[in-house]
Image (cartoon, rainbow, N blue to C red):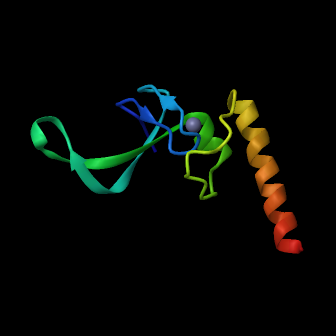
Amino acid sequence: MATNGFSGVCYRCGIACRAGAGVAEPAPGYKRGTGGRLVQNWNVQHAECALAYRGFRFDIGACERPKDMADADRIHARLVLAQMRGAAA
Ligand SMILES: [Zn+2]
């Protein structure tokens, strides 16, 4: 994963993510960039959101924004536990 070179909106929590504060992943499709040029779409998410929601397809912009990396770890652990409980039920 690469550090985001441009600011954007985190696709996990829907909150603005400034350049360098998150990670960028190539997304399907293209959009119009400077001068109408077609440029690759990128998805941006906070580094904390990437940690908290890794392995989960929560990409609706409605996730809780972790306060820090430790908080992100707690959220991830909670999600894994919930998933295990769901699978066992
Ligand atoms: Zn986020």
Q: Is residue 83 above or below residue 33?
A: below
Q: Position of residue 35 (x, y in %)?
A: 10, 36
- Name the residue: 63% across, 42% down: 51
User: Quadrant of residue 65 in the image?
Assistant: top right
Q: Position of residue 57 (x, y in %)?
A: 59, 58
User: Quadrant of residue 52 in the image?
Assistant: top right
Quadrant of the image where one finds ligand 1? top right
Q: Is residue 75 found left or right of 24 in the rendered image? A: right
Along the line of sight, the residue nearer the viewer: 1 or 79? 79
Q: Is residue 5 found left or right of 56 in the rendered image? A: left
User: Quadrant of residue 19 in the image?
Assistant: top left
Along the line of sight, the residue nearer the viewer: 68 or 31? 31
Q: Is residue 6 found left or right of 22 in the rendered image? A: left
- Name the residue: 69% across, 27% down: 67
Total numbered badges shown on the rendered structure: 0
Q: Is residue 11 above or below residue 68?
A: below
Q: Position of residue 80 (x, y in %)?
A: 78, 56
Q: Is residue 72 found left or right of 29 in the rendered image? A: right
Q: Quadrant of the C terminus?
A: bottom right
